[in-house]
Image (tube, rainbow, N blue to C red):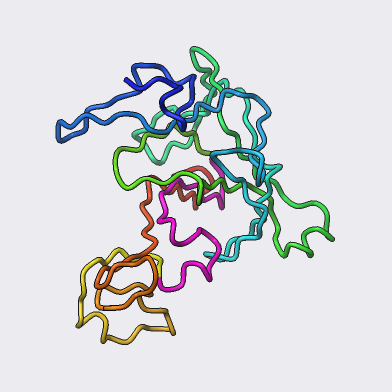
Amino acid sequence: LPSAADCCWCDGDTPDEKRKVIGSEGKEYVLIMSDEFNELGRSLADGKDPKWTALNESDYTNSAAVRYMPESVTTAIDRGAMVRVDKYNQSNSERVWVEYDEPVRAMKITTENISDPAFAKAVNKSFTSGMVQGWNKFCFTGGIVEIRAKFTMGLGFWPALWLFGNLGRAIYQKSNDGLWPFSYEDCDEAYEKQPFPGGATPQRISGCDPNPGPGLHPYQGRGATELDLVEVGDSFNGAH
């Protein structure tokens, strides 16, 4: 197994038994990146962390009402969770607090109302929260991703974990025009000829293009594909 010294992207606190896994097809996968978030009070602000960037941007995708702030993201001790009394009965929303057998250290993202009217006007948003990206820092082409996470409950939250092709960048819409959500690699002439509704941009790096530009292969489509690991929508104040 690779040691922490051999794996430059691996967290030294990751247990040895987590450094390899057998996939569903029987193939062995070796750990190439991990983060246990054990260092308390860690800053993920731009330029502060080698693996992650906590954004300092207003989100204008999906009618979002949030300003992402690096101050909304840190690492802290997590001692437990609110869990359903009856997880199989959706009509029963009763919850109880359950402490973990042992506290864990984790990344913590906090969402809050913006109480300062001047700041709310300046950022054109009603809430602060956090978005953490690994864009242009760590990239891989395939394998297995494992994440342990706990999500909040309450009306209006939409937490998510996803992978995103490095050619684009989430919430930076101009970077994604013609790249998200395309995953086509081969040439599909019929698709290329069809009109795109609402002025949408066709695939920028097309598999039908014999001369896509420097560093790109002829007749090979590229895109910024989004692979959702989980999206948690809560439209009924904790009922779902």
In this picture, residue 91 sits left or right of residue 143 = right
38, 124: nearer the viewer: 38
Residue 6 image position (x, y, % from top left): 41, 25
In this view, the residue farthest toward the left is 25
Q: Residue at x 62, y 30 (%)?
A: 75
- The verdict on residue 156 being magenta is yes
Q: Which residue is drawn at 42% across and 54% down?
A: 164
In this picture, residue 183 sits left or right of residue 65 = left
Magenta residues? 152-178
Residue 80 image position (x, y, % from top left): 54, 22
* The quadrant where residue 121 appears: bottom right
Q: In which quarter of the image is the N terminus?
A: top left
- The verdict on residue 187 being magenta is no
Q: Residue at x 75, y 52 (%)?
A: 114
Q: Quadrant of the C terminus?
A: top left
Q: Residue at x 70, y 61 (%)?
A: 125
In this rendering, is residue 2 above or below 62?
above
In this view, the residue farthest toward the front is 214
Residue 199 image position (x, y, % from top left): 44, 84
* The quadrant where residue 17 appears: top left
How many numbered discs sit on the rendered protein?
Answer: 0
152, 218: nearer the viewer: 218
**Magenta portion: prevailing SS class:** loop
Residue 128 image position (x, y, % from top left): 68, 50
